[in-house]
Image (tube, rainbow, N blue to C red):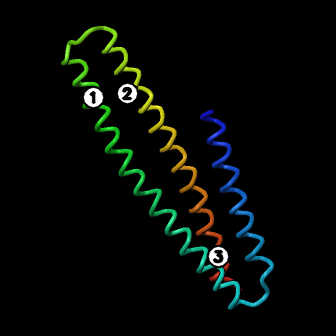
Amino acid sequence: MKFLSYAYRFASNFLFLILVYYTLNFLDKYNQRAVVAIMVLIYSAMRAASALRSFYFYQRIERLEVEARRLAAAAGEGHSAASQRKLVVNEVSRLRHAGEMNAYIDLLFLALIVLLCVSKIVTN
């Protein structure tokens, strides 16, 4: 399921990159191309800011994971309670890692889109 998530994220970002590329290539007038490129740059900046904010969120979750592991080790409760907490912490860790990878995929394609837009604005 994790790889399906990565594949979907890759495919959707790749299609967005293709859409931007063909849109910018089919516009003949420089003014139209520049306006579309600037609008895509604004959209990409908003998505990049959202992805960077999610890294801050994932960092906080990682700190909570470490604290939960420390408290579970210090609690000394029964074996079933400790194993249940360990499963929950491992699941959260796995989901956090998958979210970080999805954010990295987003940022990679957003960087490619920004380079494409800037190159179309700079060149005639």
Residue placed under numbered mark 3 in the picture: 119
The x and y percentages for residue 112 are 62, 62
Query: Residue sitting at 57 percent across and 62 percent down?
Result: 111
Mark 3 vs 1, N-terminal side: 1
Q: Position of residue 12 (x, y in %)?
A: 68, 54
Cα separation between marks 3 and 1: 48 Å
Secondary structure at badge 2 equals: helix
* Dot in front, 3 or 2: 2
Taking the image as shown, residue 84 lies to the left or right of residue 50, namely: left
Callout 1 amino acid: Ala
Judge the density around disc 2: few (<14), some (14-19), many (≥20) Cα neighbours within 10 Å: some
**Numbered circle sitting on residue 56:** none
Q: Secondary structure at mark 3?
A: helix
Mark 2 → mark 1, Cα distance in angstroms: 7 Å
Q: Earlier in the sequence, mark 2 or mark 1?
A: 1
Q: Are marks 2 and 1 in contact (CB under 8 Å)?
A: yes
**Residue depicted at 25% across the width and 21% down the height:** 72
- Going by the numbered disc 3, the residue's amino acid type is Ser
Determine which residue is flagged by label 2. Answer: 89
The outermost residue toward the top is 79
Residue 76 x/y as whole percent: 20, 12
Label 3 CA crowd tier, 10 Å (few <14, some 14–19, many 20+): few
Please identify the quadrant where the N terminus is shown: top right
Q: Residue at x 60, y 35 (%)?
A: 2
* Disc number for residue 68: 1
Q: Quadrant of residue 108?
A: bottom right
| Residue drawn at (67%, 46%) of the image | 8
The amino acid sitting under disc 2 is Val
Alpha carbon separation for disc pair 3 and 2: 45 Å
Q: Earlier in the sequence, mark 3 or mark 2?
A: 2
Q: Quadrant of residue 58?
A: top left
Could you tell me which secondary element the residue under label 1 belongs to? Answer: helix
